Amino acid sequence: MHSKGSRTTRSRSRYRATWALVLGLGACGIFAPAAFAEEESLPPVAVTYTGEVTTTIHRTEHLPENAYLKLNWTAAGSSLGKDGALPLTYTSMSGSLIDEYSNGCQEYNRTFTLPAENPQLGGWGLDENLEYPLPGWKYQVSPPSHLQPVHESYVVNPCNGNPTLFFDNPEPATVDIRPLVNEARAAEENALFETIEAPPGESTTVTREFNSNEDVVCTCLPDKTPIQGHVRLTISVDSSSGNNNVQQMPPTPPAVVPPPPTPPLTAAEQARQELKDAARARIITETAWAAGLEGAKSSGGAIGLAAALLLPSAKATLDSDLKTIKDPPLPDYTDLAAPAATAGAVGRSAGTLSSAESALRQQSAKVASITGAMYTTISRDSGAIAAANSSAAEEQAAHFSVLEQELDGVLAAQVKAGKTVAAALRRRHAHLTISKLTMEKAINAVEGDAVKDGTPLSTFKSLAGSALTAKRINLASELERGQG
């Protein structure tokens, strides 16, 4: 749905003059010139969104726990004579996501409440099917977003007997309300989020429901998984004259009470913050590397194959550092994370490039393995801080520094291997330029992966910065730069 922006006096005058001529009134002086300058405001409309979602994902051979999601919310907005992207105020939000293991232990219990940013700017959209006031015009109201904003808090009940941990997530969070379905039911899922048309001067309510109880096969799950789901979305649109055609004065805002001063960070908290800042500094380079490989993958041939083999490690590295910044606490904070073992050099796949490509893939896999261990380490550090175990927190912070030093060495080796591959590609006169259009699609794919893995798009854009600006790139230059 698009927005036509504000309506100018010139456009209003043009439509008044047009209808004066059609009705034969222009020559009669009924529309005086002064009336042409009067601008008509779009009649205001009020909307209310309500929703309820329940999803149960049952454990399988490769999925050790059941997952139970519940979410209920109500939100309202008023156009006040405007259209386009408008504020949406959430009046209620409640829900939870519980992981339950076969022995009944509920290790992770997430609770969802009203988002801190409320109202949500641009939370709903309003348009018209025809230019107002042409006969037959109607409001077009956007559906609810499939990513509902929430405030998120954790209760971690370690199944190994360690103390219960509490964690309040300070970052904006979202819950994806789309049902998990097989491809055959994708059209039903899409129908939940279609635009609503509502005639002016009336009250219109539309309710949409989706129910499922089936085995689902999708890339988001390790294997065929039994899932039960229910989604119910209701949109009420009211533009009746008795309810919404008079703009009400806003209520007097409550007195602003200054928040209490923030206590100084402890040494452990300060160390953890420095580790998260280091991860933030890597995000831009990691995003550019993943996007470049995503774009190169579509070029086909030896280059496309090489990019496709490098891409999983690049995405895993980026995902680990995004999680490092979020650092949900882990209960096993007395253990130290070791990088997962990576496969050795793989067989020949692209002629003379095989050896250099194999070395580059091996170093990239090591980067992903080490950053994964770093994410686990900082989350265990957060768990130790939440449990007030200062010695364990210091041990985790020290271990993170060791992993950082190891990462620096592997990144240098990755750059060296990348330069070797780039030189070999140049000698073969390979086509190494990736167009801006291809990079736009590649960046969209990287953004989608970040959102799917739990990072709000606005947060990812603020972290990745210039790396999300599409431009033509040279693959050899990207290989020489690497993720360092």
Image: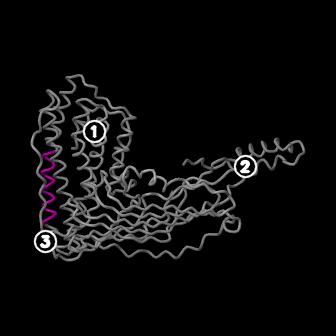
**Which residue range is magenta in the image?**
395-410
Which residue matches tag 1? 293
What number is the disc on residue 135? 2
Q: Main secondary structure of the magenta part?
A: helix
Q: How many marks?
A: 3
Which residue in the rendered view is the most extreme toward the right?
28
Amino acid type of the residue tagged 3 in the rendering = Ser
Horizontal side, residue 190 vs residue 473: left or right? right
Could you classify mark 2 by the number of other residues whose Cα lies within 10 Å: few (under 14), some (14-19), or many (20 or more)? few
Residue 473, by quadrant, is top left
- Distance between the alpha carbons at the discs numbered 2 and 1: 52 Å
Amino acid bearing label 2 = Pro
Residue beneath disc 3: 391
CA distance separating discs 1 and 3: 42 Å
Q: Which element is circle 1 on?
A: helix
Nearer the observer, disc 1 or disc 3?
A: 1
Nearer to the camera, 347 or 323? 347
* 393 within the magenta span: no
> Furthest residue to the left?
344
Which one is earlier in the sequence, the residue at label 1 or at label 3? 1
The C terminus lies in quadrant: top left
Question: Cβ–Cβ below 8 Å for labels 3 and 2?
Answer: no
The kind of residue tagged 1 is Leu
| Residue 404 covered by magenta stretch | yes
